[in-house]
Each structure stands twice: as C-alpha cells, then as structure tokens.
Amino acid sequence: MTLMIDGKPAEKGQEVETFRGEKGILVGWKEPAHSSSSGRVYVQLEGHDFQNEWYPGVIRAEWGRD
C-alpha cells in the first residue's frame, strides 16, 4: 500500500496541513494491519518538538494500492 496525499505518493519530510489548517512535517506512517484498520500517520507540527499520531484523514491522506 502507498500513502497518497492529493493523488501523489507521500514522502517523509513533506509539508502537510491538517483539516484544522495546522501546518507540519510528515515524519512517517504505519500501514493498516488488517481490513478494518486505517493505519496511522506521524506528523510534527510547526513550533512543537513532539510527533502527533493521527488517522490519515486528519491530513487528507488515503491509502492506494501498489
């Protein structure tokens, strides 16, 4: 599976924006473990020294098949 943002494969270090308008850097992600899982994305918001773990939809990302 490939994490997609705006129809393009995501890249670590990519700037992203949450649905709340917060800007941050995509640090990494974890693919869904099974069919009812959504996986997770890890984002460091501007001005913070920690990572947030969110559902992909928070940054408008989705999983695409390889």
Image (cartoon, rainbow, N blue to C red):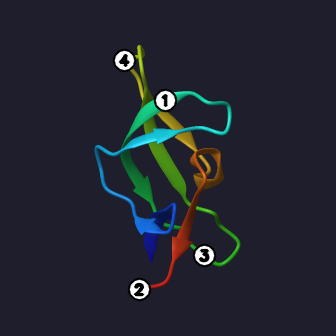
Label 3, label 2: how many angstroms apart (C-alpha)?
Answer: 16 Å
Label 4, label 3: how many angstroms apart (C-alpha)?
Answer: 31 Å
Asked whether the beta carbons under mark 3 and mark 2 sit within 8 Å of each other, the answer is no
Asked whether the beta carbons under mark 2 and mark 1 sit within 8 Å of each other, the answer is no
- The nearer-to-camera label among 2 and 4 is 2
Q: Amino acid at mark 2?
A: Asp
Mark 1, Cα crowd under 10 Å, few <14 / some 14-19 / many 20+, is some
Answer with mark 4 or mark 1, whichever residue precedes in sequence. 1
Mark 3, Cα crowd under 10 Å, few <14 / some 14-19 / many 20+, is few
Residue 21, image quadrant: top right
- The nearer-to-camera label among 4 and 1 is 1
- Dot 1: what SS? strand
> Where does label 4 land, which residue?
49
> Where does label 1 land, which residue?
23
- The nearer-to-camera label among 2 and 1 is 1
* Image x and y of residue 51, in percent: 43, 30
Q: Amino acid at mark 4?
A: Asp
